[in-house]
Each structure stands twice: as structure tokens, then as C-alpha cells.
Amino acid sequence: MAIFQSLGFLRISLLSLGIFNAFLSPEPGTPISHSGIEVIPTLVAPAAAPIIIMVILFDALMSKIRASDSTGDESKKFRSIMWVELGVVAFMVMAWLPYYLAIGK
């Protein structure tokens, strides 16, 4: 529970958006829909995934910099934040990798 308090509202929102985006990844070969609610998993989510990953990676970099500038408990806090963010990025990459690999075929 302490990690959620140290993450803060904006980081929790960003990480939740990343996890939600990962669950929207369609199966490889899914036809693209241009109307209705199907637009979100077939057009919006694949376009937003790389952007979300880059923003999370940038925040992880900032957490690493902040951890190296601080000492003691604050350094441990930012190091744990960095690892949580990298875990979410790894989850997103694993969720989206089959979809993006199928595009190249």
C-alpha cells in the first residue's frame, strides 16, 4: 500500500492508462473498423500504445535521476517507482508485441 501512496495520483493514472491500453490490444489479423466503438481497440489503442510507453519510460528516467540525486528513503522510493514503471512497460510490450509483429508480415 505504501508504494501506491508514493506513486501519486498522476503516476497511478498514467500506469492505469498503460495497463488499460494493454488489455485493448486486438488479436493479430483483426480487421480495422472505421465506425462505432470498435474504433478504439483497432485504431486508437494501437496508435496510443507507443506514445504511452514512451511517456512511462520518460517518467522512469526522471525517477532514476531523482533517485541518484537523493539519499536514504527518498532514493529507495524513487528506485521502486522506476521498477514499477518498467514493469508496466514490460507488460505493455508483451501485450502489444504479437500485434505489431503481425503488421510486418
Image: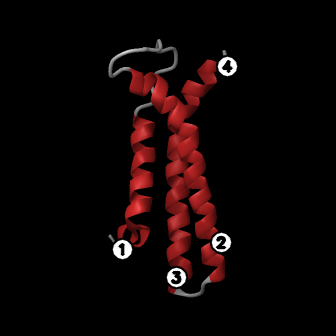
Gap in angstroms between the C-alphas marked 3 and 2: 12 Å
> Label 3, on which residue?
74
Q: Is residue 82 above or below residue 36?
A: below
Q: Amino acid at mark 4?
A: Gly
Q: Is residue 74 above or below residue 32?
A: below
Asked if the residue under mark 4 is in contact with the one under mark 3, i.e. CB atoms within 8 Å, the reply is no
Mark 2: which secondary structure?
A: helix
Left or right position of 91 against 69 = left
Q: Mark 1 or mark 2, which is nearer to you?
A: 2
Residue visible at 36% across and 71% down in the picture: 5
Neighbourhood count class around disc 1 (C-alpha, 10 Å): few under 14, some 14–19, many 20 upward:
few
> Label 4, on which residue?
104
Neighbourhood count class around disc 3 (C-alpha, 10 Å): few under 14, some 14–19, many 20 upward:
some
Who is closer to the viewer here, 93 or 61?
A: 61
Q: Where residue 18 appears, x then y in whole percent?
A: 45, 46
Between discs 1 and 3, the one toward the N terminus: 1
Q: Amino acid at mark 3?
A: Glu
Residue visible at 54% across and 73% down in the picture: 78
Mark 4: which secondary structure?
A: loop
Q: Is residue 27 above or below residue 48?
A: above
Q: Amino acid at mark 2?
A: Ile
Q: Amino acid at mark 1?
A: Ala
Left or right position of 18 against 60 = left
Between discs 4 and 2, the one toward the N terminus: 2
> Label 2, on which residue?
65
